[in-house]
Image (spheres, rainbow, N blue to C red):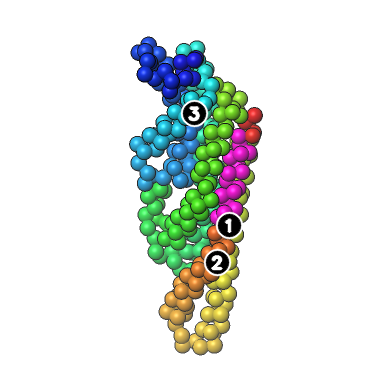
Amino acid sequence: MDLVNNFSQNLPGLELSSLVTIIGALALASLRVGSFFLASPLFGYRIIPLQVRIVISFAISFIIFNQVEMPDIEALAGFPLFSIIFVELMIGLTSGVLLTVLFSASSLAGEKIAASTGLSFAGLIDPESGTQTPVISQILSLFMIVVFLSLDGHLLALSVILESYKVLPIGATNINISMIQLGIDAGGLMFKFGALIMLPVVVGITLLNVVIGIVTRSAPTLNLFSFGFPITMLFAFFLLYVCSITIGGNFSNITNVSIDFIHRLMEGLM
């Protein structure tokens, strides 16, 4: 155990017989962080190569390896080892999925804005989901990521994951059922934040459609499609520009709520 917990000091004189124990402990230390990277909305993007994510997770696992007390790998052979691996994967995946669900509020708001303004015709293949999504949805998703990075949300999320090793050390197998309730709460907040983001634009477009309806009613010779469609799109861009501060504020709230959810998850594991 002293050799495992002082790997950086004993690395030059490491014997081959201890190499298997060291590699097993290092792999066990990287499961929680690695699964978080795979499931989180920022670190788990497909545009980031899998090799890069694996290297980053192993680099962070070296820090965990030297600061966290590791269990005896040789004594955990069999079913106890599988249960520990399952718990480590569940913690990391749940933390990443909570972030993904909350971040999906930006994509949901973008799809509804595009559907109400006629911008849904402009669609691209999203490399993350593999489906065709509106450009507005992808722009809002990138805006969400920029706000998250500017508020150091990625550093806060990683710090909470690293602190979780003190709350639930490697080797503990007690999982609280509160994970399910946190997932349900995150889904409800996703729809709430999605509605708050799209509400100013949708209300403005609705009022514009009322005005266009009155104009076309008073002048029946005007073609509703050729007259109202360009105005609706231009007014939608204007509303997005005017409401950018409000949208950014909602994204900031999503960042704070997502970090709070990870905190609540780690507190529920005690």
131 shown above or below 52: below
Along the horizontal axis of the image, is 230 left or right of 103? left
**Label 2 to label 1, Cα distance in Å?**
11 Å
- Tell me, yes or no, whether the two marked residues, 3 and 2, touch with CB atoms within 8 Å: no
| Label 2: few (<14), some (14–19) or many (≥20) C-alpha neighbours in 10 Å | some
Q: Between residue 2 and residue 267, name the one nearer to us.
A: 2
Q: Secondary structure at mark 3?
A: helix
Is residue 262 rendered magenta in the image?
yes
Please tell me the numbered disc located at residue 213. none
Of tags 1 and 3, which is closer to the observer? Answer: 3
Badge 1 amino acid:
Asn
Query: Which of the image's four quarters has the C terminus?
Result: top right
According to the picture, the residue beneath numbered tag 2 turns out to be 243
According to the picture, the residue beneath numbered tag 1 turns out to be 250
**Label 1 to label 3, Cα distance in Å?**
34 Å
| Label 3: few (<14), some (14–19) or many (≥20) C-alpha neighbours in 10 Å | many
Q: Between residue 116 and residue 153, name the one nearer to us.
A: 153
Q: Secondary structure at mark 2?
A: loop
Residue displayed at 57% across by 51% down: 254
239 shown above or below 60: below
Q: Earlier in the sequence, mark 1 or mark 3?
A: 3
According to the picture, the residue beneath numbered tag 3 turns out to be 64
257 shown above or below 6: below
